[in-house]
Amino acid sequence: MRHVNMERRGTRPLGTVSTVDALQEELERRILEGDLRPGEHLGEIDLSEQYRVGRNTLRAAFDGLVHRGLLARSRHRGVSVRVLTARDLADVYELRTALEVQAAVRLAARRLVPPEAEGALARLGRLTARSPRSEQVDADLAFHRSVVAGAGNARLTRAHAEMETEIRLCLAQLREEYASLRTLTAEHTGILRAIAAGDVAAAESAVRRHLEEATGWLVNAAGGAA
């Protein structure tokens, strides 16, 4: 075990887990919070000095993040933060929509509103325009995660969890743009109301509209057609 200290931008103590795992977690945090921007080259010398780790350790951390789709490796540029294309964004949200619609339909059929989703909605409602964007993203995703988990299908939950990193990467890539708190709160409230009413068609429509609008916004903000 090693303790690694960092003083430079966006860094924080890695703790006492394995150095490679801790370094992966720290770089992932910086990518998903937008500190490391899409397309930004990650220099081995700079990061090795910054985190006080050997270059083999750093490369092992890079390998893990490349495998998870957060970093991209090219022959001439080395390693850089992955840039999602408009097609990538559309594909991620197409799968996300399919999973979340199915979860909402299952919940509406039983008129089952997950308490965790209500809690996430309340958390979102307590935020203001001055709240850190990361808190807004966390509350938003917590709501959607709770809806999926509440449906009670372990495989559905697992599939959704496995794509959450890509969902966060989509949002990190477009950090300057995000739906307003008022819009998110209103749309999330509409989803829960449809579920509580047992209106399967309305629940499906509310989730599909919510995520398809987000898809269009993401693709347009990325500057291209899917």
Image: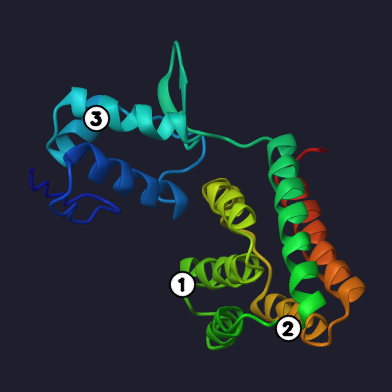
Quarter of the image with the C terminus in it: top right
Which label lies toward us, 3 or 1? Answer: 3
Label 2 secondary element: helix
Q: Residue 170, percent across and down?
A: 60, 48
Taking the view exactly as shown, the residue that stands out farthest to the left is: 2
Label 3 secondary element: helix
- The type of residue carrying mark 1 is Pro
Tell me if residue 140 comes above or below residue 125 in the rendering: above
Q: Determine the residue positioned at 20% across, 29% down.
A: 57
Q: Provide the residue designation for mark 2.
A: 189
Left or right of 63 in this view: 202 = right
Q: Determine the residue positioned at 73% across, 83% down.
A: 189
Q: Provide the residue designation for mark 3.
A: 58
- The type of residue carrying mark 2 is Thr
Left or right of 226 in this view: 13 = left
Tell me if residue 17 comes above or below residue 45 in the rendering: below
- Pick the front one: 133 or 26: 26
- Pick the front one: 28 or 198: 198
Q: Earlier in the sequence, mark 2 or mark 3?
A: 3
Q: Earlier in the sequence, mark 1 or mark 2?
A: 1
- Pick the front one: 211 or 155: 155
Q: Provide the residue designation for mark 1.
A: 132
Which labelled disc corresponds to residue 72? Answer: none
Disc 2 packing (10 Å; few <14; some 14–19; many ≥20): some
Assess whether mark 1 and mark 3 are in contact (beta carbons under 8 angstroms): no
Residue 174 seen = no
Taking the view exactly as shown, the residue that stands out farthest to the right is: 201
Residue 165 seen = yes
